[in-house]
């Protein structure tokens, strides 16, 4: 840290100032031929003006004066500071390289141990104007969208809601802003749900989650929310929430059935879906003498992909991988997300034809450009369904998959007993 040139101001305070995101300048509290003099500035101030502290120390703030600066600017500051002890003033200044910058200064008089100092915090007027435009554009968009939008601070209080959000909750905008989010809490979620929510918040990434909320009249509604952290200068300030009411969707039995039987990430059948397919598959296999083969597929080195690129990219690859498989099978075949990066493909074909189909899929995966042209491969284990004991068929297919991975991956192994 720079030497403490301000009498009686603790180094701890200077450390806080020095690490502030706001540019800060501290000067002597006198006006004469030599004063005010610059005593201190933080890193943010150095970056704004392209000077380092030692170039500015004991200089008069007029060092920043441009050709557009008022001639009596110091006199104007002296008059205002005498009247108000804190005030704002707009100026045009020079950086070190003589580039002009329009600033609004917040100037405050400090009294420390009966000595006066001035603290000045400059704000780039261009940034201020852009911020105002962005805020107005944001408000214009959110007030004209059917999406329910809110901003929540880190302490869990609403700082902004649009009309759609307020209308859904039954509360007015005035009632919601400044209230904690638990104003719409239904009490239907357990501690595990909130633990999962907090873990997702700690990842500092956007995510989707569905809440069962309660409006002002006591009615319950399902809110599917996308929660995004608002990050400024690498620091999270609040969370943006974009919501949709999906109550009617959840009341739809077809939607509920799909929700229960399909994997939410890939859209393929999940294990529940597999169980629902089994009676028809085994009946067809037994009575109609249809041939069915079970294929277990595994993305090679998927853990390395997650570790290198992150789980978000990993999820995108799982979606692309699933879509690719689904596009290569027929309406009489089935694709199931078995768990993690493992998939079960049930083909209405004998072993020979199954091998041909799977080899087409394997080559397609090997040559496919996944997210950002990422290349991956997959291993396959095949076993034919020979009786009603599908567990035995799965076990054999799993052994075949293990053999394919053990022998080098990106290959197909067929096993039957």
Image (tube, rainbow, N blue to C red):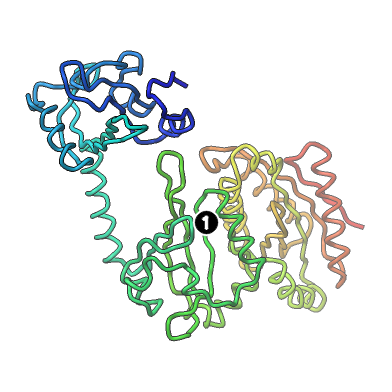
* 384 over 83 or under it: above or below: below
Please identify the residue farthest to the top as the structure is shown. 55
Number of labelled discs?
A: 1
Front one among 76 and 296: 76
Q: Is residue 166 above or below residue 104?
A: below
Query: Which residue in the structure is indicated by mark 1?
Result: 207
Secondary structure under tag 1 reads strand
Answer left or right for 213 relative to 119: right
Q: Callout 1: few (<14), some (14-19), or many (20+) C-alpha neighbours within 10 Å? A: some
Q: Classify residue 46 by image quadrant.
A: top left
Q: Position of residue 381 (x, y in %)?
A: 79, 51
The image quadrant that residue 325 belongs to is: bottom right
Q: Residue at x 45, y 39 (%)?
A: 234
Q: Is residue 118 above or below residue 215?
A: above
Where is residue 299? Give x, y as percent: 69, 46
| Residue at the spot 74% in from the left edge and 45% down from the top edge | 379
Query: From the viewer's perspective, is 168 left or right of 344?
Result: left
Judge left or right: residue 239 versus residue 79: right
Of residues 146 and 393, the one drawn nearer to the viewer in this rendering: 146
Q: Is residue 282 above or below residue 416?
A: below
Left/right placement of residue 234 relative to residue 354 reads left
- Residue shown at the point (62%, 37%) measured from the top left: 308
Looking at this view, name the residue that lies furthest to the left.
71
Q: Position of residue 276 (x, y in %)?
A: 71, 75
Q: Position of residue 289 (x, y in %)?
A: 80, 73
Q: Residue furthest front?
A: 114
* Quadrant in which residue 331 is drawn: bottom right
Query: Which quarter shows the C terminus?
Result: bottom right
| Residue positioned most to the right | 417
């Amino acid at each position: 840290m720079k030497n403490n040139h301000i009498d009686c101001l603790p180094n701890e305070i200077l450390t806080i100032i020095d690490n502030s995101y706001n540019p800060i300048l501290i000067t002597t509290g006198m006006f004469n031929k030599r004063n005010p003099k610059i005593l201190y500035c933080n890193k943010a101030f150095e970056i704004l003006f392209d000077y380092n502290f030692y170039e500015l120390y004991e200089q008069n703030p007029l060092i920043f004066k441009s050709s557009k600066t008022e001639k009596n600017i110091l006199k104007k500051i002296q008059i205002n500071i005498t009247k108000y002890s804190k005030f704002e003033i707009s100026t045009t200044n020079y950086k070190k390289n003589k580039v002009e910058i329009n600033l609004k200064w917040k100037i405050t008089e400090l009294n420390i141990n009966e000595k006066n100092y001035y603290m000045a915090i400059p704000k780039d007027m261009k940034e201020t104007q852009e911020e105002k435009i962005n805020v107005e554009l944001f408000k214009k968009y959110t007030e004209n969208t059917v999406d329910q939008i809110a901003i929540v601070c880190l302490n869990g209080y609403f700082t902004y809601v649009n009309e759609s959000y307020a209308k859904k909750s039954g509360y007015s905008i005035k009632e919601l802003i400044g209230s904690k989010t638990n104003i719409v809490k239904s009490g239907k979620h357990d501690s595990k749900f909130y633990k999962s929510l907090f873990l997702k918040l700690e990842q500092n990434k956007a995510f989707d989650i569905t809440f069962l909320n309660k409006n002002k009249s006591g009615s319950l509604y399902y809110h599917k929310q996308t929660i995004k952290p608002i990050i400024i200068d690498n620091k999270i300030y609040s969370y943006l929430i974009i919501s949709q009411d999906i109550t009617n969707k959840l009341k739809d039995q077809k939607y509920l059935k799909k929700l229960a039987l399909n994997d939410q990430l890939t859209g393929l059948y999940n294990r529940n879906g597999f169980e629902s397919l089994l009676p028809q598959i085994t009946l067809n296999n037994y009575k109609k003498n249809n041939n069915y083969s079970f294929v277990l597929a595994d993305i090679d080195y998927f853990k390395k992909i997650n570790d290198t690129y992150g789980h978000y990219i990993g999820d995108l690859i799982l979606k692309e991988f699933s879509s690719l498989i689904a596009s290569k099978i027929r309406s009489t075949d089935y694709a199931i997300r078995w768990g993690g990066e493992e998939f079960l493909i049930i083909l209405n074909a004998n072993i020979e034809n199954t091998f041909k189909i799977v080899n087409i899929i394997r080559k397609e995966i090997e040559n496919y450009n996944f997210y950002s042209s990422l290349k991956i491969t997959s291993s396959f284990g095949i076993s034919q369904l020979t009786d009603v004991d599908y567990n035995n068929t799965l076990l054999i297919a799993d052994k075949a998959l293990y053999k394919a991975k053990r022998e080098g991956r990106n290959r197909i192994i067929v096993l039957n007993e």
